[in-house]
């Protein structure tokens, strides 16, 4: 088992570490001199980190590929407030040398309890056709096993083992709650849409070594896969209404909400619109939570740039946290002293980190 995980980075800043990672991205780039260097993204179950190898690159270029496991020796430091590794040495590891559980992030929640929560919601359906449909998916051993394990996305939100189930249970709870304020909503239809909206991720994503797209997922996308899965299950349920089938298909293809986000149709009835907004909300809340967790050890109230949300984020828990009286008194005393002393001449800081030559 690994003895260093990426969650340990704050305790090893500016130190040389030796640890193993899975390669989630590998790029060969040119230095200013024209010589190549390696730009990698490495991962373990606690997250991802950027890594650069500047020297002795020739021997390493063909020694490994994306999704391989590496043992790495390198300097851990910060660049633009994010940890990175400058690699000194690396070695490809055989599968027999690693414990796969060390490299894929996993939900901290109990999978059996999440699945049971889903079952309880489905048992509350009044529409027998929709209940039979969802139950048919949940009773399929292959689908159930994958649904319990799959991430909800490659990287943007709920990107961990069990993420799909975690996301859908959270979405069920939100849908159930919001339905109480809008009695015109067909609750069973909305919850069925929530169950189906990302079920194609079990075939779109590969998640045995790192999170990536399968060839089928890359070529078709999860919505097309979901329509195929829906058609197959409905065919096994006698007398399933065509009208409900059409509504479910629309819930699937419209849940991204906008053409530019990959929806071939905009949401055109209340349940479809609600599914889109609640799905989007749950995804964004998880993206924020995960970002705050990754940067929990930093002193700043503000995070680094969140690419999926297109902004930096304010951690309100840090922002509103009151200083202990002793710390507040010390800070006040320091401020008072600073106001009567002659300020020292500033010294220019030397940059460190992402050199290219």
Image (tube, helix red, strand yellow):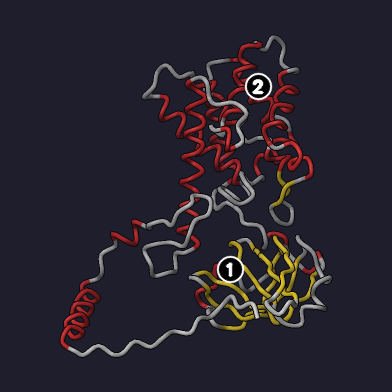
Give the Cα distance between marks 1 and 2. Answer: 42 Å
In depth, the one of 258 and 22 nearer the eye is 258
SS at mark 2 in the image: helix
Q: Indicate the quadrant where residue 356 lies.
A: bottom right
Task: Using the image, determine if residue 121 lies above or below residue 281.
Answer: above
Checking the image for residue 284, the label placed there is none
- Residue 324, horizontal then vertical, whole percent: 24, 71
Q: Earlier in the sequence, mark 1 or mark 2?
A: 1
Q: Secondary structure at mark 1?
A: helix
Query: In the depicted view, which residue is nearer to us: 262 or 293?
Result: 262
Which residue is depicted at the point 60% across and 67% down?
49
Find disc 2 in the rendering and name its residue: 133
Label total for image:
2
Looking at the picture, does residue 331 appear above or below residue 138?
Answer: below
Disc 1 + disc 2, Cβ < 8 Å: no
Q: Does residue 8 appear left or right of residue 30 in this picture? A: left
Q: Nearer the viewer, mark 1 or mark 2?
A: 1
Q: Position of residue 50 (x, y in %)?
A: 62, 68
- Above or below, comparing residue 269 to residue 208 in the picture: above
Q: Split into 4 quadrants, where in the image is the N terminus?
A: bottom right
Return the residue at label 1: 6
Relative horizontal placement of residue 74, taking residue 209 as reference (left or right): left
């Amino acid at each position: 088992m690994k003895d260093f995980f990426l969650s340990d980075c704050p305790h090893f800043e500016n130190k040389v570490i030796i640890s193993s990672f899975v390669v989630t991205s590998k790029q060969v780039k040119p230095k200013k001199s024209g010589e190549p260097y390696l730009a990698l993204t490495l991962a373990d179950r606690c997250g991802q980190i950027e890594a650069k190898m500047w020297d002795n690159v020739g021997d390493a270029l063909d020694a490994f590929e994306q999704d391989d496991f590496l043992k790495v020796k390198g300097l851990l430091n910060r660049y633009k407030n994010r940890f990175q590794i400058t690699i000194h040495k690396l070695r490809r590891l055989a599968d027999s040398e690693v414990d796969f559980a060390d490299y894929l992030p996993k939900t901290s929640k109990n999978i059996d309890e999440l699945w049971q929560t889903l079952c309880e919601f489905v048992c509350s359906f009044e529409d027998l056709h929709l209940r039979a449909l969802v139950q048919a998916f949940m009773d399929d051993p292959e689908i159930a096993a994958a649904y319990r394990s799959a991430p909800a996305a490659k990287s943007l939100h709920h990107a961990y083992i069990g993420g799909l189930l975690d996301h859908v249970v959270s979405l069920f709870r939100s849908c159930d709650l919001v339905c109480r304020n809008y009695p015109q909503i067909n609750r069973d239809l909305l919850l069925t849409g929530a169950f189906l909206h990302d079920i194609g991720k079990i075939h779109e994503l590969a998640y045995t070594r790192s999170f990536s797209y399968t060839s089928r997922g890359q070529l078709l996308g999860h919505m097309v896969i979901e329509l195929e899965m829906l058609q197959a299950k409905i065919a096994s349920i006698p007398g399933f209404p065509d009208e409900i089938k059409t509504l479910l298909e629309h819930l699937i293809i419209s849940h991204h909400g906008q053409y530019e986000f990959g929806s071939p149709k905009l949401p055109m009835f209340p349940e479809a619109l609600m599914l889109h907004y609640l799905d989007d909300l749950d995804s964004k809340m998880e993206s924020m939570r995960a970002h705050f967790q990754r940067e929990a050890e930093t002193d700043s109230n503000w995070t680094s740039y969140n690419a999926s949300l297109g902004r930096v984020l304010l951690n309100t828990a840090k922002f509103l946290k009151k200083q202990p009286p002793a710390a507040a008194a010390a800070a006040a005393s320091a401020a008072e002293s600073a106001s009567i002393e002659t300020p020292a001449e500033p010294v220019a800081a030397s940059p460190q980190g992402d050199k290219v030559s």
